[in-house]
Image: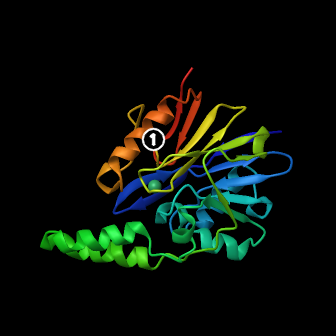
Amino acid sequence: MNKIYILNINFKYNETDQVIHPVILKDKNYMVLVDCGYPGFLPLIEDAMKLEGLECSQLTHVVITHQDYDHIGSLSDLKQRYPQIKVVSSIQESPYISGDIKSLRLEQAEKMQESLPEDQKSFGEFFCNTLRSVETAKVDITVNDGDQFDWCGGCQILSTPGHTPGHISLYVIEEKALITGDAAALENGTLVIANPQFTLDLECAAKSLEKINNLGAKRYICYHGGVLDRI
Ligand SMILES: [Zn+2]
């Protein structure tokens, strides 16, 4: 049976309670994870999957919506432990995820470091070092806007650039459910641009958010913020 599982990964970041929502798509042939948490999060993902009766050893694919470290952080661990998993990303994001090009977030953080007030410089340096330490992993399958997979009766890749240039979202056609990644976050019942201050192209992100809002999906699953149902 086709099923979408929305994982709740709870953790503390900077002393505050946080939650992220990787997603699992499961049908009789495939099991697909969408995004895989911060560095060191593999045990948290394994535990969250176990609660649903799922095992990482059943995974066939992992889709990475974009290169940020809260989405690819555990990718290298996941691949090493479960080498059968095929990594899927957009063509544009793939060299950053594979580590062939320095991540755009690190470029941005290094640039911001110069203009940070003195009292924030040590956190800025800590953040840069965290990004530098993220382990990368080879992308096996690269995709473009409109590409389709058989998963759960049919899934379509939706190009949703702005947060990063090659950001993708994933539309589960039968369920009319959109897995947004960070093209939309859910805040107070509304889809919004995730972290506008770090968005690499705000104008482009606004267009992607409009595209998402006009898609007519019944369910929006946001990595940051969770589920929005529209009847
Ligand atoms: Zn994120």
Q: Specify few, some or many for label 1: CA neighbours under 10 Å numbering under 14, 14-19, or 20 or more.
A: many
Q: Residue at x 50, y 35 (%)?
A: 212
Q: Residue at x 47, y 63 (%)?
A: 68
| 50 left or right of 104 in image | right
Q: Quadrant of the N terminus?
A: top right
Q: Is residue 71 visible?
A: yes
| 150 left or right of 72 in image | right
| 218 left or right of 195 in image | right
Position of residue 76 measured from the top left corner of the image (x, y, whole percent)? 61, 74
- Front position in the image: 35 or 81: 35
Colouring mode (rainbow / by chain / secondary structure / one colour): rainbow
Position of residue 15 measured from the top left corner of the image (x, y, whole percent)? 34, 61
Position of residue 174 measured from the top left corner of the image (x, y, whole percent)? 73, 32
- Front position in the image: 33 or 19: 33
Q: Which residue appears farthest toward the right when viewing the image?
A: 28
- Front position in the image: 144 or 117: 144
Q: Quadrant of the C terminus?
A: top right
Kindly state the secondary structure of the residue where label 1 is placed: helix
Q: Is residue 40 visible?
A: no
Q: Is residue 141 above or below residue 23?
A: below
Q: Residue at x 63, y 40 (%)?
A: 171
Callout 1, which amino acid? Ser
Quadrant in which residue 92 is drawn: bottom right
Q: Which residue is mark 1?
A: 208
| 184 left or right of 137 in image | left
Q: Residue at x 48, y 75 (%)?
A: 101
Position of residue 22 measured from the top left corner of the image (x, y, whole percent)? 58, 52
Quadrant in which residue 200 is drawn: bottom left
Quadrant in which residue 191 is drawn: top left
